[in-house]
Amino acid sequence: ADVLECAVVAWLDGDGLILYANPAAEFLLSHGREELAGEMFGFPPLLTEQPTRVNVISRDGCVRLAELRVERLAADRGGGRVLLRFKDITGYHQDVVAAREQVRRRDEFLAMLSHELRNPLSAIRGASLLLARDDLLPDARRGAADILDRQFKHLERLLGDLLDVTRISQGKLEIRKERVDVVRVVQ
């Protein structure tokens, strides 16, 4: 596993001085073991059940989101030593943000699609109510039939587009970008 995906540990004595840091801690805290040993940790370590999220600037200069857990060392009999466990969760956090954005875009798309489907269905409903009347004149009957035909074609195009979007998202349809003559497209 990549060093950044692993839990990172550092030991502190009872006063908050760093006694040890592993290579992953050195990377995440942007200092070597020699620089960290004997230094005061940035804030008082409070024993926590739940992890705390902190931003750190790692050795590569990137701001990373890390999960921090502070635990008492089991082998330390009243000496006050604690164990800091860091875990880089930057990738996970980015994946969550991207997933939420995808859900937001899907919801917007479904809302737009619902609206687009409602318009032709309203026209179809109106035309079908007209056709159900016994006293409808032949011109009005033809007009209602034209409305049904036009709206049916509109729904057919919408459903075709929806199927294309599904095929694209499933990788069954490929989009190829190329330059085209705008005049030809407009005609």
Image (cartoon, rainbow, N blue to C red):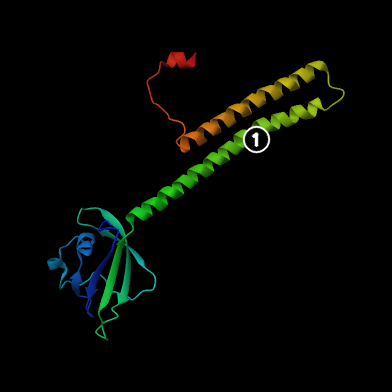
Q: Which residue is mark 1?
A: 118
Quarter holding the N terminus? bottom left
On the image, the x and y values in percent for residue 38 come to: 15, 73
Task: Please determine whether, in this image, residue 106 is positioned above or below residue 45.
Answer: above
Q: Nearer the viewer, residue 54 or 60?
A: 60
Could you classify mark 1 by the number of other residues whose Cα lies within 10 Å: few (under 14), some (14-19), or many (20 or more)? few
Which element carries disc 1, helix, strand or loop?
A: helix
Residue 96 in view (yes/no): yes
On the image, the x and y values in percent for residue 110 come to: 56, 40
**Residue type pointed to by label 1:** Arg
Looking at the rendering, which quadrant does residue 24 occupy?
bottom left
Residue 44 in view (yes/no): no
Looking at the rendering, which quadrant does residue 43 occupy?
bottom left
Residue 130 shown left or right of residue 119 in the figure? right
On the image, the x and y values in percent for residue 59 come to: 19, 56
Looking at the rendering, which quadrant does residue 21 occupy?
bottom left
